[in-house]
Image: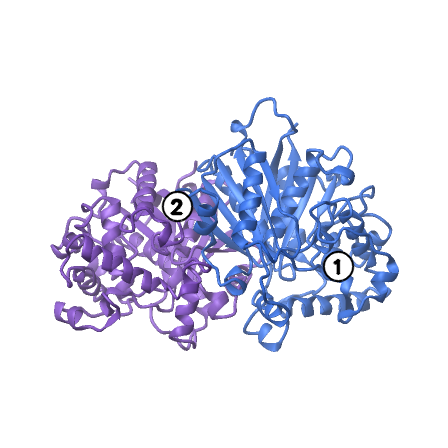
Chain colours: A purple, B blue
Amino acid sequence: MTAVIVAGIGQTPVGEHWEISLRDLARDAMREAIRDSGGMQPQSLFVGNMLAPSLSNQAHLGPLLADHAHLTGIEAVTLEAAGASGGAALRQGYLAVASGMVDVALVVGVEKFPDRIGAEVETALATTTDSDFEAVQGLTPTAQAAMLMQRYLHEHKVPADGLAGFALIAHANAEGNPNAMFRKSIKLESYVQAPFVNEPLRQFDVAPIADGAAAVVLARAELLPKDPRRPLVRIAGSASTVDTLSLHDRRDLLQFECCRLSSEKALKQAGVPLESLDFFEYHDAYSIYAALALEAVGFAEPGLGWKFAADGGISLSGRIPAATMGGLKARGFPGGATGVYQAVEATMQLQARAGVNQIKDAKCGLIQSIGGPASTVISHVLQTVA
Amino acid sequence: MTAVIVAGIGQTPVGEHWEISLRDLARDAMREAIRDSGGMQPQSLFVGNMLAPSLSNQAHLGPLLADHAHLTGIEAVTLEAAGASGGAALRQGYLAVASGMVDVALVVGVEKFPDRIGAEVETALATTTDSDFEAVQGLTPTAQAAMLMQRYLHEHKVPADGLAGFALIAHANAEGNPNAMFRKSIKLESYVQAPFVNEPLRQFDVAPIADGAAAVVLARAELLPKDPRRPLVRIAGSASTVDTLSLHDRRDLLQFECCRLSSEKALKQAGVPLESLDFFEYHDAYSIYAALALEAVGFAEPGLGWKFAADGGISLSGRIPAATMGGLKARGFPGGATGVYQAVEATMQLQARAGVNQIKDAKCGLIQSIGGPASTVISHVLQTVA
């Protein structure tokens, strides 16, 4: 199997881009990734998107975005796996190149929450839950997360402000990311005083939905220059797994089983022990997701992920830096683009392009894209080529 | 690259399944395919679906359908490419196995048009066009097809009933398919007397949208028995290409350029000349699509596809049998399931399981899945293993 290299990266700032269309956002990220790759010409385009059919009345993004990037004639298709759509597109790009069928693949994640707000967006987001048994009862992803957090606080006797560490670190890191939505640190008081979104979930426990696009060019190793100007980064492991879609079918609400399973598979394929990871980009759509992911992947004992974060374990100089560019919480959560942002940011760390947020001598990182309450979990191990 | 075998097939009848849910439809097809494969256990599930997020408020089908088939823990993700979603899922299954990363992949296409009819469905279908420039003007896929047909009749001086051949053959073939929606032949008079849907498009020029699910199990050749009870069928070629999404960006409305390009690529990969094909499952969502596909792939000169059909070139005993089990027109058009139905039907032909519709000594077939007006075209060559 051929080695798959991240040959170029691109991203737009994350935020409320009222004046930029979905197709333009995607094009900007794709252009930047192609330019960054030295002008490689992709044969395939894999699009990660979550809600354009519902919120922008726009399905069939493959030809739309390929055409908009002057790439007609190539392959182009959309991957959907709720919040993990970006990770799904990344994995399909990886499989296409790994199969030997495609030399160069372009992966773009894009999301735009257009001129509709509030209930309409929450209704669209609720289509990612089990429509017949969950959404129909009024259960939304945010309500699911609130239930999980309530259970977590109760079961493990966690103080009410116990999960604050995730937001504090994310916001501190976003300060150094010019593409982040919220480039400012917050204090514990801000966390505690913020209003409830859905008790016990407070404002800073929830990542902000936002517009954005990110792209990577993936290529066969043989196509890369022998003497590259930057360290080559390869996708050393890739795994995608699903759990039940609905929470009520889980044996244990607080075990994000597929966070464990998919990271184990990806690490095994890469031949990388957990201890060798230099950073972990988790999917902190909600702070409780971050806690459960840390525990499931194996960085903290069950019930102690919050403590691990509170004690600085995930800070840039901690045991395993997480959300190194602000994470979903403070870089922002552009739906189906998120998993591709993770790949872009991991590549920046591995190529020493992360600026003030640079992790010293980063050689290997794990990124994890989640759809629903870990209903879909897609993990990738990115590594510098020795 | 490992050879990819169609190890099992399954399908539900196509029709109006008011009493069967989307998840049950998909499960029935998946179960049958797994049973047909002798109980192979897939590691990956690729779902082809077009409109469940809009029409059933249900996105994130991967974990939903994997769980419903008792397959949690595996990979599962949805592919969307409008009417070509089934072909897209088939191709991703193919890439996954061809890459060597996955031994056994399950591909399911499913579509359900629930308790909403008429304008709402047409609005949902219109999300597959260019929303900002086409749908916003009221242009739907059917209106696009009417424009193409009008241009075709005018440009090539085709008689008003010139395209009847496609519906006549499709309905004749559907008679012999127990899973078809319309199991009855029609006469030329019925075609001519049918009301206009969108002039010059008459009722029998339009494939009926319908509910249905189809599934295939794809596996590495090494996993198949050395002495199988049926001829082994492999995917010998796979190609996916996109044109502009919008019709107004085309140089020539009547050239389905990507029908040509993707079939050329797939045939080249398979090492199969056009003349060696024993049948062609085209995507006859509209009779004009069938005519343009025949011409683009190379079975008829430009402007003469209708004549080729009228002269019996596509009948079961003709030069290149098409719509051998009824096609979209008479088997029915279950949206994103359609491309997988094609793979199931092609496998039936190649394994001599097509009953009264069996093409004698069929060894090699081309199937083509189309999204929009050939905006996405995905071609596969299926072949018996010598």
From the top left corner, tell me how far across and down residue A39 is, in percent.
44, 56
Tell me, for residue A137, which label it has, or none: none
Answer with the quarter of the image where residue B30 lies.
top right
According to the image, label 1 marks what residue? B287
**Quarter occupied by the C terminus of chain A:** top left
Q: Is residue A188 above or below residue A228?
A: below
Whether label 1 touches label 2, CB < 8 Å: no
Given the image, on which type of amino acid does mark 1 rest?
Ser
Residues packed near mark 2 inside 10 Å, few (<14), some (14 to 19) or many (20 plus): many
Q: Nearer the viewer, residue A254 or A274?
A: A254
**Quarter occupied by the N terminus of chain A:** top left
Classify mark 2: helix, strand or loop.
strand
From the top left corner, tell me how far across and down residue B2 is, in percent.
52, 33
Given the image, on which type of amino acid does mark 2 rest?
Ser
Q: Which residue is drawn at 74% across and 45% down?
A: B324
Q: Residue at x 52, y 62 (%)?
A: B56
Classify mark 1: helix, strand or loop.
helix
Residues packed near mark 1 inside 10 Å, few (<14), some (14 to 19) or many (20 plus): many
The answer to whether any part of residue A142 appears in the image is: yes
From the top left corner, tell me how far across and down residue A231 is, in percent.
29, 47
